[in-house]
Image: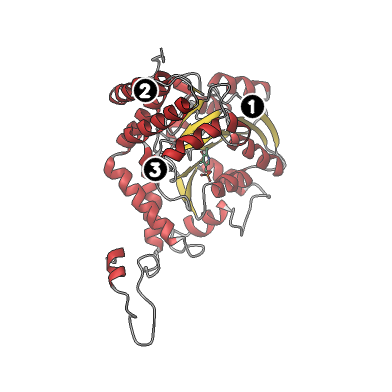
Amino acid sequence: MVTLDSVRAVHLPVSEESTTVTHPFLDLAPLSAGSFAAIEDRVARLLGTGQDVVIMQGEALLPLEGAIRGAAGPGTVALNVITGPYGQTFGNWLRDCGATVHDLAVPFHTAVSAERIRAALAEHPEIDFVSLVHAEAATGNTNPVAAIGEVVRAHGALFYLDAVASVGAEPVLPDAWGVDLCVIGAQKAMGGPAGVSAVSVSERAWARMAANPGAPRRSYLSLLDWKERWIDGGRKALLHAPAQLEMLALQACVERVEAEGLSTVMARHASAAAATRAGALALGGLEPYVYEAKDAAPVATTLRAPSDVDASELVARALASDPALPLAAGGGALAGEMIRVNHYGPDATRGAVQGCLAALGAALAEKGLKADLEAARRAVEDAWVRPAGPGLSDA
Ligand SMILES: *Cc1c(COP(=O)(O)O)cnc(C)c1O
């Protein structure tokens, strides 16, 4: 195997005719169809799914958009659940496809309940498509997909799920939950590359797309192209040159998750979320943005800044002490009030959580506000060893 060190050591032309130097990122053997299919199978195992899994050659927005444009058209009546910024985007794509869209928006400090979905379906029985985001890294909430899936299946609608931020942080089980189109990306809790992504597709979803005259074909957005030219052909020939480095990174990422154990990776994220929540409450000044712990996503924790403090300024002060901390202010209109602790992937560690709360506490203290750094430190340690289980209150 060619390593970076061996490359650095060989700074000589490889032959008299060429001045090219061997490079580990550039001089790879082509990725075979067999290797590509094996990576798809590994992702399918991670999701516990027997459905077709298509790895698309772009960031997760590619299958997110491709699946909506493939499955929805002028005859579609959609229930679009909005629990954060992605839900808004999906509604816009659905309307752009000509679908009739019923938006169901819930405040970002909570999650949607299966009961609300049941009521919306009862009110509009013609709904035949439901779009939902599982966990929102941007708002820090997570939705009860298992219970929602039962309701959607009983109604018979096609169920589309954005699991980009939940996969690796909490269970994502498209078959058990009746999800017809489940999109994942590796760049959040899996600690992998952002440039390729995957979608599991049920037989029902394939049938819906095949019957949709507006479904993209001969297009980068087309899932049907992959069905007809890749899957139905026995996965022998790729549609175009794959994003080879990203595919290898995805393979390495799944191998690393398997080696650590998916349940261990998920436990790390649950601990990070519980510890951030407990630590922020002990610190004082910062409130969990999501009111109830059961609605808070394991992938990332959002906090509310004190009412007279600008969240983006607080985050900037904290990052000035350590720019590597996984901290951000909320996006758009949330920038003034929301702090995001992005404790995912390699940052789902006690050290990252302790570092974020210490830096936020110091930033609060600089502004003359009370911050009990020692209490926060102890609360993180306690919560990490014994993560709060479902139903336990914050008190
Ligand atoms: C992160 C994320 C994506 C992917 O978007 P990027 O910002 O490009 O990483 C999609 N959906 C959800 C819910 C996400 O959290």
Q: Mark 2 to mark 1: distance in Å?
A: 37 Å
Q: Position of residue 258 (x, y in %)?
A: 30, 44
Residue at 61% across, 47% down: 70
In the figure, 392 relative to 97: above or below? above
Residue 190 tag number:
3
Disc 3 vs disc 1: which is toward the camera? 3
- Image colouring: secondary structure
> Label 2 belongs to which residue?
376
In the figure, 149 relative to 42: above or below? above
Rendered-image quadrant of the C terminus: top left
Amino acid carrying mark 2 in the image: Ala
The residue closer to the viewer here, 279 or 185, is 279
Ligand 1 neighbours mark 2 (CB distance < 8 Å): no
Rendered-image quadrant of the N terminus: bottom left
Q: Give the left or right position of residue 17, taking residue 313 as reference.
A: left
Q: Position of residue 173 (x, y in %)?
A: 42, 35
First-in-chain label (3 vs 1): 1
Amino acid carrying mark 1 in the image: Leu
